[in-house]
């Protein structure tokens, strides 16, 4: 004979399992898998979800208890908590996001819908050091924005102080009108890198929105000069974070995080088009945006030629796509003729490269596009 409590628990279990089964079926339809709640298939489902999270195929994972422990993916950066966690369970859950990935992800972001501050302090004191809260947790927005002195009496400049130093020591016009020495370039790179690292932290605070101090135009100007100096001084193309003379570091990962994309440029082009191609200030903004982008500066001439071709009847989006296809065809035809490649095979080879995001240099793919070569020499 079952007690009432046992019956209620059994019903709750069955209802929960039904929900889980339904969620797994949705997952199966999305990823073309065949998992269910049976013991063997459920373990495979768990492993598959873990792998897809690590490979960034899933954007958000809603959990109750599973995946709060025993699961590690360095790409995870935010944990939303609506549960009364404490002690080792709290530390384990928070640890899902604390894996450093690169210079962009130097910490995890915890968003709590419940007040867990006392539980967090207690857990840190028990499993670490009662005085380690300032080390384990980020400081307040005001500290990073205005500066602070740490527990070792060392002063750390705040964002506003760093920006004021940048504007005072390196006014924008200095890069245009003055010859910047190598030492000044190094100082600028280190100062601007410190500002970018600070912005990377401050963007996690809601208070920072609308209070960035540097305008978007100034930011793009400085970023353009930063990339120019990087291109001038870098010793190799191998690393994204490169050391010059062992005393300077370029934060190219952080620069790429805020890189301008072509959609933003086309939006500005559309505004220029709406002004009947007369607003020269928009052209200046476009050039600044291109100059401040690692990806787009190599396509500067392509974009400028397109802007020069537009008129009042231009449909920006569709005409841009047609323009790109035309230029792509012209350049491919030129390369094919220059190297005497097989036209159809070469076009297919390039289409596959764009599809895969890489040029395949192994196997027989390259051989198929090459012209016949005499085994006896002579070309």
Image (cartoon, rainbow, N blue to C red):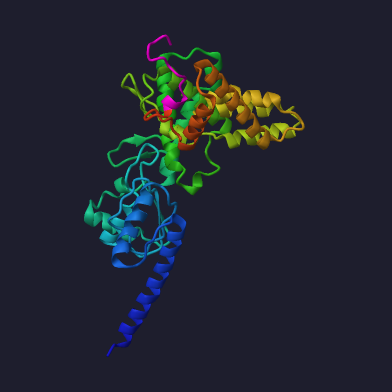
- Quarter of the image for residue 327 reads top right
Q: Is residue 38 above or below residue 315?
A: below
Residue nearest the viewer, comparing 289 with 359? 359
Q: Is residue 346 left or right of residue 21?
A: right
Q: Quadrant of the C terminus?
A: top left
Q: Is residue 117 above or below residue 219?
A: below
The location of residue 36, given as percent across then percent down, is 36, 65
How many numbered marks appear? Answer: 0
Q: Is residue 106 above or below residue 58?
A: above
Q: Is residue 128 left or right of residue 304?
A: left
Q: Residue drawn 37% across and 71% down?
A: 17
Q: Quadrant of the N terminus?
A: bottom left
Q: Residue drawn 45% across and 40% down?
A: 145
Residue nearest the viewer, comparing 341 with 351? 341
The location of residue 340, given as percent across then percent down, is 51, 17
The location of residue 58, given as percent across then percent down, is 43, 52
Q: Residue drawn 55% across and 29% down?
A: 218
Q: Is residue 209 left or right of residue 277?
A: left
Question: Quick check: is 378 in the magenta stretch?
Answer: yes
Question: Can residue 290 be seen?
Answer: yes
Question: Can residue 293 be seen?
Answer: no
The location of residue 140, given as percent across then percent down, is 40, 47
Give the dominant element type of the magenta stretch: helix, strand or loop.
loop
Q: Residue drawn 43% across and 55% down?
A: 31
The magenta-colored residue range is 366-379
């Amino acid at each position: 004979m079952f007690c009432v409590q046992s019956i209620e628990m059994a019903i709750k279990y069955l209802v929960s399992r039904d929900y889980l089964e339904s969620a797994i079926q949705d997952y199966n339809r999305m990823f073309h898998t065949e998992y269910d709640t049976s013991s063997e298939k459920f373990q495979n489902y768990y492993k598959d979800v873990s792998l897809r999270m690590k490979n960034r195929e899933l954007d958000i994972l809603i959990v109750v208890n599973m995946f709060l422990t025993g699961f590690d993916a360095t790409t995870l950066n935010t944990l939303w908590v609506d549960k009364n966690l404490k002690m080792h369970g709290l530390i384990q859950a928070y640890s899902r996001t604390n894996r450093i990935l690169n210079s962009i992800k130097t910490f995890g972001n915890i968003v709590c819908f419940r007040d867990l501050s006392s539980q967090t302090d207690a857990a840190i004191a028990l499993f670490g050091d009662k005085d380690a809260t300032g080390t384990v947790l980020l400081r307040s927005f005001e500290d990073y924005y205005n500066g602070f002195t740490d527990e070792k009496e060392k002063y750390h400049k705040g964002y506003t102080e760093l920006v004021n130093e940048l504007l005072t020591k390196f006014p924008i016009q200095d890069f245009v009108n003055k010859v910047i020495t190598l030492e000044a370039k190094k100082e600028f790179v280190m100062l601007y890198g410190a500002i970018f690292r600070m912005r990377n932290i401050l963007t996690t605070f809601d208070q920072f929105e609308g209070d960035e101090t540097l305008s978007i135009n100034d930011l793009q100007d400085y970023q353009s000069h930063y990339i120019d100096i990087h291109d001038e001084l870098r010793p190799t193309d191998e690393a994204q974070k490169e050391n010059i003379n062992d005393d300077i570091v370029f934060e190219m990962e952080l620069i790429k995080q805020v890189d301008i994309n072509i959609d933003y440029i086309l939006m500005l082009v559309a505004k220029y088009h709406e002004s009947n191609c007369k607003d020269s200030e928009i052209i200046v903004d476009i050039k600044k945006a291109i100059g401040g982008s690692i990806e787009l500066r190599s396509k500067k001439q392509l974009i400028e030629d397109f802007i020069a071709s537009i008129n009042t009847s231009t449909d920006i989006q569709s005409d841009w796509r047609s323009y790109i296809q035309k230029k792509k065809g012209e350049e491919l035809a030129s390369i094919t003729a220059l190297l005497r490649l097989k036209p159809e095979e070469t076009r297919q080879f390039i289409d596959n490269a764009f599809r895969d995001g890489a040029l395949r240099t192994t196997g027989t793919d390259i051989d198929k596009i090459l012209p016949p070569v005499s085994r006896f020499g002579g070309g």
